[in-house]
Image (cartoon, grey):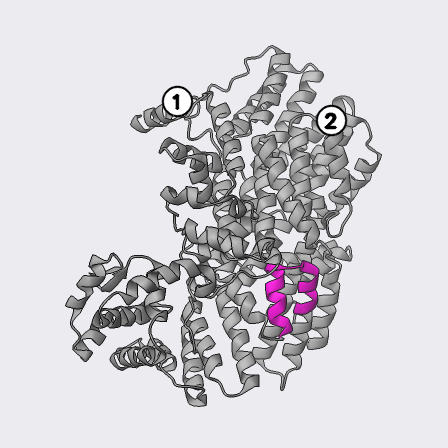
Amino acid sequence: MWVVTPVNPPPLDRTWPPTLADAWPRPASALPERVRTRVLRLVYGDPRAAASLAARLTERQAAGLDPLPVEPADLAPELLRARRRALRALPDDTRLLLLLAAADQYPVATHAFLRAVAAARLDTRCLESAETAGLAHAAAGGVRFADPWTRIAAYESAGPADRRDVHRLLARVLHGSGETARRSWHRGAGALGPSGRLAAELTAAADRARDAGDPALSGALTGRAADLSPDPRHRSGLLARAAVDAWDAGDGDRARVLAARTHGEALHGVLALRTGHAGEAFDALTAGAAQAAAGGRPSARSEEHAGHLLARATEAAVYTGDLSRCREAVRLAGRLGIDPPGVLGGLAAAVEGRYADARELLGATAGRCGPGGDPTLLLHAGIAALLLGDHPRAATATHRSAAAARARGLVPPVSQAAEFRAYADFWTGRPRAAEAAALDALRQAQATGQDSGACHLQAALAMFAALAGDTDLCRERAAAARGYALAHGLGLPAALAQWALAFLDLGHGRHDAAAARLRALAGAGPGHGHRAIRHLAIPHYVEAAVHTGDTRVARAAHAAYDRWAHAVHSPDELALSARCRALLTPGADTVEHYRIALDLHAQGTRAVERARTELLFGGALRRLRRRTEAREQLHSALEAFESFGAPHCADRARAELRALGAPATTGRPPESPRASLTAQQLRVALMAAEGATNREIAVRLALSPRTIDHHLRGVFNRLGIRSRIELVRLLAEEGRD
């Protein structure tokens, strides 16, 4: 018997009922955050169902290694049994109406219930008994079920013949403009058995839905076409397309379940890029590109597909940090007779030390960031702009990548764009807004099974915590990122997390620890560093090394960095190189290098680094007894750090001002309580002020109660309060103001 299963998981922005938080037991709360989030989403945010499902997961599923169950009977069997018992007590006519409504809503919403009722001359007064039982009630558009489990049970408790009948009835009344795909769905659902003709109809309808930006609908249609296809080889191809549709719609677990029934290298490579080992993803994607180009007669479509797979292989190389593999991909592109896509050519040139060629190639890629383009190539434009130090263009390209993905109904690229936009927002002085966006993207990545992306976002959030001086949160985020990254060959998030810890050490004056961490980032390769992070790390390594007195390696690192900065002509990179030169130059000669650095910063956009340069310059001027100039630089740095929400850096500026005997204030009005909190702290504070317990907040944010307790302690420390009562009063007073 064919059983309809949910294709569309619940919306990502669903708020789970806090009143049911205590139903979330210890076994479920012990799951990794990324698995816990997916469990909650699969069960429509119902903590009771989540508790039941979590207790039945295998060890590999609980660890996130295998996909979670996707069939309704495996998600909440107890709840479904209870709903079936309640439905069996209803009159036959009532159950028929509920079956018709369920088939009209699940898993494809067709909005034809009222027309079907009219066509069959059914009496909707029969719904009164369902309303009395609390199972469903009549609504403006048809029937509203008490919960998703009632809807599923209403469909599954019916016999196969009754199901086919209601699907055929719905197909007959769906004859309006734009309803072809949904009519085909019901025709396929009402089929008795395999049918090549129906499979072809469903496949054509799926293609139209896919082109219209509805991958959830195209996935449902393609999956049913696979069920009806009499040709096993054709069925395998349809399953692969259904898996891609499920992935594009944000249903990562269903995509992996379907992919396990196919053998396509390209599909497994795409999934491994976001859910598995990045090195294996690179191998599978390059193999898939070769197969795509070699399959049959060469065509523009096959070359485009091969180019797309090579672009994704380039992303795999970026994530691993083993950028030398880009040269393999470039050679493969040459053999296939296609141009290296995206940042591939520029990265290969950079690896080979051809910096002038790299700048030209990356510049051309970064320039392809117009609106409405391909989300993958727009993401590559953003990555290229980041490598060139052009953060405004990087922000524009990644924003447009996300917008283009949304327009096409593609879920995964939205959070992937946020991963790289975080760098631009961090350096250009918007850390709080960027942190909020990264938190949203993290939740989306976790809910859709993009574990590699979630790892990268955890590292980015560690970076924001480092700027905020939040030691505990930075270490927690960095540990989460590194733990996953080292197991999956993800050199980029591993290196970024290490850099965040070093930046935190540097801000707190722990120069020996910072120097040790940053020196390790000079190596390349998975888990040991990353060439892109190397450019991020060298200016701070020089600063830490100068304080420790061991500058031999730092001078060599600066020479390599200076060569890159001059090759790409980035004002910010040149400013940082000049700052390194100032740090490495003793005595009064350092002043001119600092002035050059600040002049270059004025042409760039890295506001955070400009503030650090002002802080270092102010300290150098104080030691040279140039008090007036020092005071000017330090006050500017202090004001910037306060606006960024970087209290430990602001404290260093204040300490320098006190050493000058100058007022350690900026004259700015004090921050409001809300503005002084990080994005995550503000979310927790608002929920706590509404009366939610730590466990309830943990369920709603898919975090552990221990993490919520840490956030609340941070809120109390920042606001200078000791209790929730004071928190409620403080936020209420601000609201009245």
Q: Is residue 160 above or below residue 423?
A: below
The quarter of the displayed image where residue 286 is located: bottom right
Q: Tell me: 725 left or right of 588.
A: left
Label 2: which secondary element: helix
Q: Tell me: 522 left or right of 89.
A: right
Q: Tell me: 526 left or right of 304.
A: right
Mark 2: amino acid? Thr
Return the disc, 1 or 2, that comes first in the chain's sequence. 2
Magenta run includes residue 284: yes
Q: Name the residue rendered at 43%, 23% in the picture.
A: 723
Q: Percent x, y for residue 8?
A: 42, 64
Report the span colored magenta: 264-285
Mark yes or no: residue 418 visible: no
Q: Identify the disc placed on residue 438.
A: none
Please rate how many residues cluster around mark 2, counting C-alpha atoms within 10 Å: few if below 14, some from 14 to 19, many from 20: many
Q: Percent x, y for residue 172?
A: 26, 82
Q: Percent x, y for residue 359?
A: 67, 55
Q: Which of 595 and 465 is in front in this view?
A: 465
Mark 1: amino acid? Glu
Q: Name the residue under label 1.
A: 726
Q: In this view, does 376 lie above or below 421?
A: below
Separation (CA) of disc 1 from disc 2:
49 Å
Tell me if label 1 and label 2 are in contact, CB under 8 Å.
Answer: no
